[in-house]
Image (cartoon, rainbow, N blue to C red):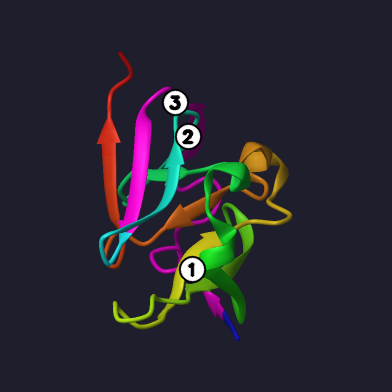
Amino acid sequence: MTTQHPGTGKGTGTGTGHRVEVTRGTQHVTVTIDGRVVAESRRPLLLSETGLPVRYYLPPQDVNLSLFEPTDTHTTCPFKGEAAYWTYLGTEGGGGPRPDVVWAYPDPIDSVAEIKDHLSFYDTVADISVKEAD
């Protein structure tokens, strides 16, 4: 499945003032789904994009990937490239699977190359706690 990235439709291309910036962060980011910690990082990449909330992209080493399964879903963003998605598998006796809750850009466009293979979570499903570094 391939779809256009939300909020990046016609009229938001190069030259229209749309900006995407990636900065290295030092915040402590903890991601939980259904009360279970699925990721924890002190080295997030912060992606700021016109019209969207800041997204935290975490190194794959900081995500418990055994709790996720890749899906066939792919979306295309003209400002970042093609994203691949994973489903949270859920827990016995806990919440069930959460489809396409995390995504990454395996081959992002050059202007955001830093986010390659880093993972970001939908905050509508995952609880993303961010604490400033000490």
Whole-percent x and y of residue 50?
Answer: 37, 46
Q: Nearer the viewer, mark 1 or mark 3?
A: 3
N-term-proximal mark, 1 vs 3:
1
- The Cα–Cα distance between marks 1 and 2, rounded to whole angstroms, is 22 Å
Q: Nearer the viewer, mark 1 or mark 2?
A: 2
- The Cα–Cα distance between marks 1 and 3, rounded to whole angstroms, is 24 Å
Few, some or many C-alpha atoms within 10 Å of disc 2 (few <14, some 14-19, many ≥20)?
A: many
In-front residue for pair 14/67 = 67
Determine the residue located farthest toward the top in the rendered image: 134
Q: Residue at x 58, y 64 (%)?
A: 66
Q: Tell me the element at label 3.
A: loop
Q: Are marks 3 and 2 in contact (CB under 8 Å)?
A: yes
Q: Residue at x 47, y 53 (%)?
A: 120
Is the N terminus in the top left, top right, bottom left or bottom right quadrant?
bottom right
Whole-percent x and y of residue 36?
Answer: 33, 59
Place residue 97 in its image quadrant.
bottom left
Determine the residue located farthest toward the bottom in the rendered image: 1
Name the mark on residue 25.
3
**Residue type at numbered disc 1:** His
Residue that label 1 marks: 5
Q: Residue at x 63, y 56 (%)?
A: 105
Residue that label 2 marks: 44
